Amino acid sequence: MYAEPKRLLLFDGVCNFCNSSVLFVVDRDPNENFVFAALQSDVGIKALHDHGLTGTSLDSVVLIEGDRAYTCSTAALRVAKGMRFPWPALYYLLAWVPRPVRDAGYSYFARHRYQWFGKSDQCRLPTPELRRRILV
């Protein structure tokens, strides 16, 4: 499915913001620590099931690191921590904020992302250079 040392980032494949976020991470992940899959894909569905997240809505990004799964603001901050400088600073600045407060802001943004950024009818096909990092 995916190499164990890699971090699997599950995202909403029809969300324009989420697709742009994947490209943002790719550009700031020169060591290729992250691989990606849409939450709606077979890989995404299986990963959610394997980590007991079958009821997870598409309003949350999910980061799987080894046998741990992170959602909402914690997942986003852990992704920032895994990118190149200066993005890990975001993790260290915001990780001290209580999770319920962080998640409230995250949930507000997630509820409005389609309205603000739009939605595609289907998952976008990755470019040839990204294809090896996008799991389907």
Image (cartoon, rainbow, N blue to C red):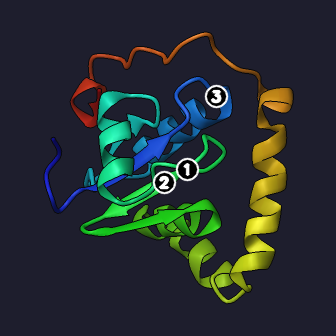
Q: Position of residue 122 (x, y in %)?
A: 54, 13
Extreme residue toward the top, this view: 121
SS type, badge 3: loop
31 relative position to 87: left or right: left
Q: Nearer the viewer, residue 118 or 53?
A: 53
Question: Counting other residues with Cα less than 10 Å from the Cα at mark 2, is it few (<14), some (14-19), or many (20 or more)?
Answer: many
Work out how far the residue at label 2 is from the one at label 1, CA to CA, in angstroms. 9 Å
Question: Counting other residues with Cα less than 10 Å from the Cα at mark 3, is it few (<14), some (14-19), or many (20 or more)?
Answer: many
Q: Which label belongs to residue 15?
A: 3
Closer to viewer: mark 2 or mark 1: 1
In this picture, is 59 found above or below 31?
above
Q: Residue at x 66, y 45 (%)?
A: 59
Image quadrant in which the N terminus is located:
top left
Q: Identity of the amino acid at label 1? A: Thr
In this picture, is 38 found above or below 26?
above
CB-based contact (under 8 Å), mark 2 and mark 1: yes
Q: Residue at x 55, y 35 (%)?
A: 12
Q: Identity of the amino acid at label 2? A: Val
| Tag 2 residue | 62
Q: Nearer the viewer, residue 84 or 35?
A: 35
Q: Residue at x 58, y 76 (%)?
A: 91
Q: Which label belongs to residue 38?
A: none
Q: Identity of the amino acid at label 3? A: Cys
Res. 14 image quadrant: top right
Q: Nearer the viewer, residue 136 or 53?
A: 53
Q: Position of residue 37 (x, y in %)?
A: 37, 36
120 relative position to 100: left or right: left
Q: Which label belongs to residue 56?
A: 1
Res. 6 image quadrant: bottom left
Extreme residue toward the bottom, this view: 96
Image quadrant in which the C terminus is located:
top left
SS type, badge 1: loop
